[in-house]
Image (cartoon, rainbow, N blue to C red):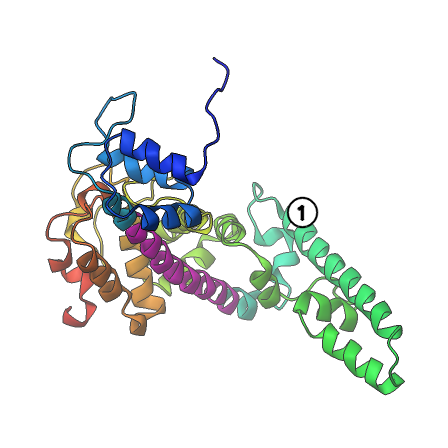
Amino acid sequence: MRTFDKPAIDVPSQIELLKQRGLLIQDEARAQCFLQSVSFFRLSPYMRPFQQSGDANHRFRDGIGFRQLTRLYDFDRRLRLLSMDAIERVEIATRSMISNHMGPHYGSHWYTETGMFQQTFDHQRLLATLQSKQHAATRDYERECLRIDRLQAENSRKAHLKCQRAKESYARHYPTTYDQPTLMPGWAMLEELTLGDLSHLYKGLAKDSDKKAIARRVELPAPLMQSWLHTLTTIRNICAHHARMWNRELGIRPELPKKANFSWPRHLLHPGTHTRMFAALCILNHLMHKVGPHAHWDQRLHQLTEDFPDVSLRAMGFPHDWYQDPFWHPERA
């Protein structure tokens, strides 16, 4: 352990530091503008692949320019946006799949029954989370009603405003409209959960038959569905914090099929660790084929890689001829 002694330096000094490390900067004004918008610290992980291995002074390899860093950063930014588009669709579809199966089979408030879940599932935490959301929404509504009461307006106008405010969220609408049961119905509850909560809820369902029925809607066995939701929660958190996806190794390794009775890339059927981002993108592609086939997500991913031919896909686990696999062309299957 030692005392931290690195000074905070302004953008012009950051430019000078990069030049001292051997980075070629042809347009310093443009580089300064970039570093005003994207911090030096955030850009640092994108520098490392271009720096000399093991050099304590972080010197760049000969011929490396600032544009190479920004190109890699821009590719990663666009990959995050593309991934988030898919994750959003998958998350919303998962809520719907769980709701459309569990509600008709077990009733509107199925999730309030302890027996619906495994003993290891923290059922009280789920109920407390929903109760807290409803209480917070009710408090907000009551404060808004007090502000409305102080307005110089007709009582009919005030009543209309209160009615409108009550409808702004279901967490607010339900407790101001119904007193039994105390918590909102299952289809509304699912919309209040994060993707991580949703993943835990699916994992915690008591009956394997329910898990299987839900997973069948995206042509998956239940264990894969469970693992993939967990992995996508990690990917979503990476994207939400604008963190690096390129060349990242997955901390949560998704379970992959050893034999697949559905379309799956040949590359991932071969033995290997498959901890790079390619596996996660394949998971998203399979799910997008089921929940958003008209979004042409596979084509958009391919176009992104075509727009950045200088970016190493191998660092993400892509095989050389990845787009030739029939997995990426469902219309040809």
Q: Is residue 96 magenta?
A: yes
Which x, y percent locates residue 64? 19, 38
In the rendered image, which quarter is residue 251 located in? top left
Query: Measured along the vertical axis of the image, is residue 141 above or below residue 46?
Result: below
Residue designated by label 1: 124
Q: Is residue 242 in view? A: no
Q: Which secondary structure is most common in the magenta stretch?
A: helix
* Residue sitting nearer the eye, 323 or 111: 323
Which x, y percent locates residue 5? 48, 20
Left or right: residue 315 versus residue 98 is: left
Residue depicted at 35% across the width and 57% down the height:
83
Residue depicted at 42% across the width and 42% down the height:
39
Q: Is residue 241 in view? A: yes
Left or right: residue 21 versus residue 108 is: left
Mark 1 belongs to which amino acid?
Answer: Gln
Residue depicted at 87% across the width and 83% down the height:
153
Left or right: residue 305 versus residue 188 is: left
Q: Quadrant of the C terminus?
A: bottom left
Numbered range of the magenta stretch = 73-100
Query: Measured along the vertical axis of the image, is residue 104 above or below residue 201?
Result: below
Which x, y percent locates residue 32? 37, 46
